[in-house]
Amino acid sequence: MFSYVSLGTNDLKRAARFYDATMATLGYARCDVSGEPNWDGWIGWGTYEQHGATELALWVCRPFDGKPATVGNGTMVALVAKSWRQVDAFHAAALVNGGMSDGAPGLRLHYQPDFYAAYVRDPDGNKLAVVCRGFTVPQPV
């Protein structure tokens, strides 16, 4: 359904530190846009290949209109985790790298018996969820 999601930032270096750390916990590295024009001020994580012909990525950037980035009320990006450990690691990395908790890791039984999630705000206030489904007890190490 989605090609990419873009979130605004007022401090690209700060956002890069936050997303480098958090996205690494889910196995995502920065998208390679080297050799392409017009990517100044954009950093992405996920899949970006063949000049975007294949793309599934999360990008952060300064707003195109030049105005300050603001948070969308009711806006949230939910990311998939493969394990509860990834959810826990994402939440911990977010807090160490300038994010704020908006809900500690745990089962959210009011959604589903296997809905293990954590919620954070990035340094600009954008809300992120990281969700693992398919388990009702912790996975063995």
Image (cartoon, rainbow, N blue to C red):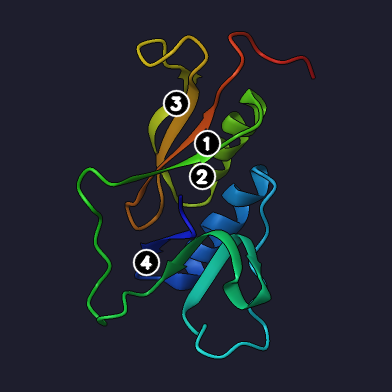
Residue at image x 52%, y 83%? 39
Q: Quadrant of residue 63?
A: bottom left
Q: Identify the residue under disc 1.
A: 91
Residue at image x 55%, y 65%? 44
Q: How far apart are marks 2 and 1 (CA)?
A: 5 Å
* Mark sitting earlier along the chain (4/2): 4
**What's the residue type where badge 4 is placed?**
Thr
Q: Do the residues labelled 2 and 1 touch (CB within 8 Å)?
A: yes
Q: In which quarter of the image is residue 11?
A: bottom left
Q: Identify the residue under disc 4.
A: 9
Q: Which of marks 4 and 2 is in front?
A: 4
**What's the residue type where badge 2 is placed?**
Ala
* Mark sitting earlier along the chain (4/1): 4
Q: Which numbered disc covers residue 94?
A: 2
Q: Do the residues labelled 3 and 1 touch (CB within 8 Å)?
A: yes
Q: Which numbered disc covers residue 104?
A: 3
Q: Do the residues labelled 2 and 3 touch (CB within 8 Å)?
A: no
- Along the line of sight, the residue nearer the viewer: 70 or 37: 37
Q: How far apart are marks 3 and 4 (CA)?
A: 24 Å
Residue 95 in the image, given as x and y percentages of width and height: 49, 42
Q: In this view, does 119 lie to the left or right of 22?
A: left
**What's the residue type where badge 1 is placed?**
His
Q: Distance between the residues labelled 3 and 1?
A: 7 Å
Which secondary structure lies at badge 4?
Answer: loop
Q: Distance between the residues labelled 4 and 1?
A: 20 Å
**What's the residue type where badge 3 is placed?**
Ala
User: Mark 2 Cα within 10 Å, few/some/many (few <14, many 20+)?
Assistant: many
Residue 27 in the image, given as x and y percentages of width and height: 70, 47
Which secondary structure lies at badge 2?
Answer: helix
Which secondary structure lies at badge 1?
Answer: helix
Q: In this view, does 27 lie to the left or right of 59?
A: right
